[in-house]
């Protein structure tokens, strides 16, 4: 019998199919197991290592610090410049062991404890990718040492950053001030976005007052960087906006003349345009070099300034308070007219002293024998103390206070400079509040001649003199004349009201004529000139008090116990262009202070247009930043003598050049000291 075999073995095919399925499933499972093992290896076993590497190989947003605005005088002479310095930097994203890195860098870069503390304070609040300065202004030796060992410091870089330079040194130090490194206290109040990548900030003077204008707006750049902080590619960029350029009302030539007159003296000069309130010159002597403070002043240099008996860091023009002496008599005389107590015909007899009714104490006139018959005009010309003793007794301290405060005494002037003193015009309320005792009538007599508790700053005296020159129109002193840049700013250059005066315009003219006669034939006659008329008033302020019945004897006094000399005045008398206040500490008398004022008047009225004083190498372009070179390294052809009437062109920032130009940063109260 013939055997038949089936054409298809279904059971066999099923077994084969199942085997293949199981093999495929097993293969997939093995692959999945392998993949999961790899994932576990990467995500669990080596998580820290690969997470850090991943964090470092990513897109970063790097801040681009803006270039700080330049500062010029009224003629376009550069007063505050920018120049590049080498700086060591690092960020938290690039360096794991920051403390260890700093410890190893200390001997290489000669880091001081101040450098270290400042860096650690700043890096705590900085963004993780923001590069923070370790040390500014590296020397060639610092850079050479670091270059040899650079491979040991991955993430630490030497970069070029912009810092501040003051080409005229101590000449404008008390007005412009300086910048210094941002300290921990400032960090707490600053906007971190605005100051990203910035190490410096204005500390005193114009640099501090107009920090918002000068600083500019930072930009940002998106980059892809590897684990070693090397930029792989640039993804995008927002350019920073440089700070505004400021044009001050100061005149370089006038400032030079005033500083020369105060050379080797202690004192201050303030000159104001009475028509606008613009400060034309502001000098405090002695002065200091602001460049010492920009990157941190050494302990040796700071100690020398701090311990100097002449106090060069003290801004006498704004902060110094002095008894104004007889310089306030013209204002006080007009107060007598305002209240109807005296007029130009009111006459008294001066025997050389005055005493209150029922009191034997004699208030002496500076002239022992007295001035005889004295009216208001003569009292100003010859500075008769007795006339004002009588006037103050009739007025009383409350009316005197009310009147004199209209001229700015006993309160801040509102000048656009920081740290201004108020001075003091005393009254009964002040004495009760501060000394817990009643006001005495004899104190009114002392205040009437600018003595006693009455004190004023040189700036206040200059403003009060400007009001006199303006026939009562009030001006606010200011140094900013114009601001050019991205941030709008308006400057008010005009009187802002008039004081309340019950007299007439002729009274102002009569007082001006009396002040002219002070210079022509009175206590200030040593500075009269045929070229123009000066209206002025001298003053002498006692430093060491003299007991009743005793005689002032210079020969037994030390130099620092001699009287202060003061002078206020304006010129030309009939159309004032300049008002001046001079304080010469221990200058002995007001006539000496007047001698200081005369060359200042001469320069402004006679010589300024015909023979203006300019720096020997007056820059006519954008400043050192545009040249990319340090002060002292200027090529001979880079600068040239300026046309006396030329103005400096406003510097233009090239696109992208401010990427390495951080803004700037110190004051006697906020000084950063380094070794």
Image (cartoon, rainbow, N blue to C red):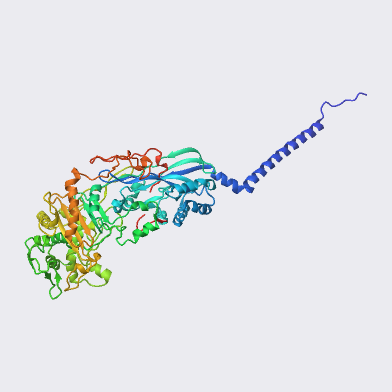
Horizontal arrangement in the rendering, residue 438 relative to residue 675 (left or right): left
> The N terminus is located in which quarter?
top right
Name which quarter of the figure residue 287 lies in: bottom left
25 w.r.t. 367: above or below: above
Measured from the top left, where is residue 459 in percent x and y?
23, 56
> The C terminus is located in which quarter?
bottom left
Horizontal arrangement in the rendering, residue 252 relative to residue 362 (left or right): right
Measured from the top left, where is residue 647 in percent x and y?
26, 40
Residue 553 in sight from this viewpoint: yes
Measured from the top left, where is residue 131 in percent x and y?
47, 47
653 w.r.t. 528: above or below: above
Residue 466 in sight from this viewpoint: no
Measured from the top left, where is residue 316 in percent x and y?
27, 58
Instruction: Residue at 37% x, 60% y: name it.
Output: 303
Instruction: Residue at 81% x, 27% y: name it.
Output: 8
Towards the viewer: 529 or 236: 529
Horizontal arrangement in the rendering, residue 298 relative to residue 42 (left or right): left
- Residue at far right of view: 1
Instruction: Residue at 47% x, 51% y: name it.
Output: 109
50 w.r.t. 300: above or below: above
């Amino acid at each position: 019998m013939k055997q038949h075999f089936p054409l298809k073995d279904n059971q066999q095919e099923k077994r084969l199919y199942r085997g293949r399925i199981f093999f495929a499933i097993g293969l997939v499972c093995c692959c999945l197991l392998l993949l999961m093992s790899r994932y576990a290896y990467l995500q669990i076993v080596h998580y820290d290592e690969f997470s850090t590497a991943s964090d470092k190989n990513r897109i970063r947003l790097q801040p681009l610090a803006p270039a700080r605005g330049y500062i010029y005088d009224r003629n376009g002479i550069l007063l505050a410049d920018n120049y590049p310095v080498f700086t060591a930097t690092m960020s938290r994203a690039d360096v794991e062991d920051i403390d260890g890195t700093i410890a190893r860098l200390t001997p290489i870069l000669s880091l001081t404890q101040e450098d270290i503390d400042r860096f650690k304070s700043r890096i705590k609040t900085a963004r993780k990718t923001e590069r923070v300065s370790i040390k500014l202004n590296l020397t060639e030796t610092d850079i050479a040492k670091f270059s040899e060992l650079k491979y040991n410091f991955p993430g630490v870089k030497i970069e070029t950053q912009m810092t501040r330079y003051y080409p005229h040194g101590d000449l404008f130090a008390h007005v412009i001030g300086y910048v210094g490194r941002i300290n921990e206290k400032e960090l707490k109040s600053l906007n971190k976005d605005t100051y990203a990548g910035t190490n410096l900030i204005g500390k005193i003077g114009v640099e501090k007052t107009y920090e918002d204008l000068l600083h500019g707006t930072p930009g940002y750049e998106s980059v892809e960087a590897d684990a070693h902080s090397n930029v792989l590619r640039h993804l995008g960029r927002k350019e920073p906006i440089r700070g505004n350029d400021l044009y001050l009302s100061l005149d370089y030539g006038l400032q030079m003349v005033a500083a020369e007159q105060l050379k080797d003296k202690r004192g201050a000069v303030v000159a104001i345009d009475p028509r606008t309130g613009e400060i034309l010159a502001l000098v405090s002597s002695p002065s200091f070099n602001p460049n010492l403070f920009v990157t941190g002043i050494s302990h040796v240099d700071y100690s020398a300034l701090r311990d100097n008996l002449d106090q060069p860091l003290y801004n006498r023009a704004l902060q110094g308070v002095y008894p104004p002496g007889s310089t306030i008599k013209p204002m006080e005389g007009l107060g007598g007219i305002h209240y109807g107590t005296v007029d130009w015909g009111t006459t008294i007899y001066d025997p050389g002293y005055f005493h209150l009714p029922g009191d034997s104490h004699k208030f002496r006139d500076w002239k022992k024998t007295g001035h005889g018959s004295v009216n208001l005009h003569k009292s100003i010309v010859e500075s008769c103390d007795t006339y004002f003793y009588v006037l103050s007794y009739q007025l009383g301290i409350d009316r005197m206070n009310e009147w004199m405060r209209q001229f700015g005494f006993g309160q801040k002037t509102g000048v656009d400079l920081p740290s201004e003193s108020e001075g003091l015009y005393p009254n009964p309320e002040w004495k009760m509040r501060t000394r817990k005792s009643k006001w005495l009538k004899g104190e009114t007599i002392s205040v009437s001649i600018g003595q006693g508790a009455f004190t004023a700053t040189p700036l206040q005296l200059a403003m009060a003199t400007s009001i006199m020159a303006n026939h009562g129109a009030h001006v606010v002193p200011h140094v900013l004349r114009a601001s050019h840049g991205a941030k709008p700013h308006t400057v008010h250059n005009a009187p802002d009201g008039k004081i309340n005066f019950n007299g007439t315009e002729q009274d102002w003219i009569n007082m001006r004529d009396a002040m002219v006669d002070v210079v022509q034939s009175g206590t200030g006659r040593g500075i009269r000139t045929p070229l123009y008329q000066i209206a002025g008033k001298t003053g002498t302020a006692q430093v060491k008090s003299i007991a009743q019945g005793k005689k002032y004897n210079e020969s037994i006094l030390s130099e620092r116990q001699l009287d202060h000399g003061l002078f206020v005045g304006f010129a030309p008398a009939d159309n004032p262009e300049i008002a001046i206040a001079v304080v010469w500490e221990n200058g002995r008398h007001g006539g000496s202070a007047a001698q200081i004022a005369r060359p200042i008047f001469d320069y402004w009225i006679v010589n300024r247009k015909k023979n203006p004083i300019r720096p020997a190498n007056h820059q006519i372009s954008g400043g050192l930043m545009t040249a990319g070179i340090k002060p002292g390294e200027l090529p001979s052809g880079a600068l040239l003598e300026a046309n006396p009437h030329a103005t400096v062109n406003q510097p233009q920032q090239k696109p992208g050049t401010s990427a390495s130009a951080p803004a700037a940063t110190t004051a006697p109260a906020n000084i950063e000291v380094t070794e």
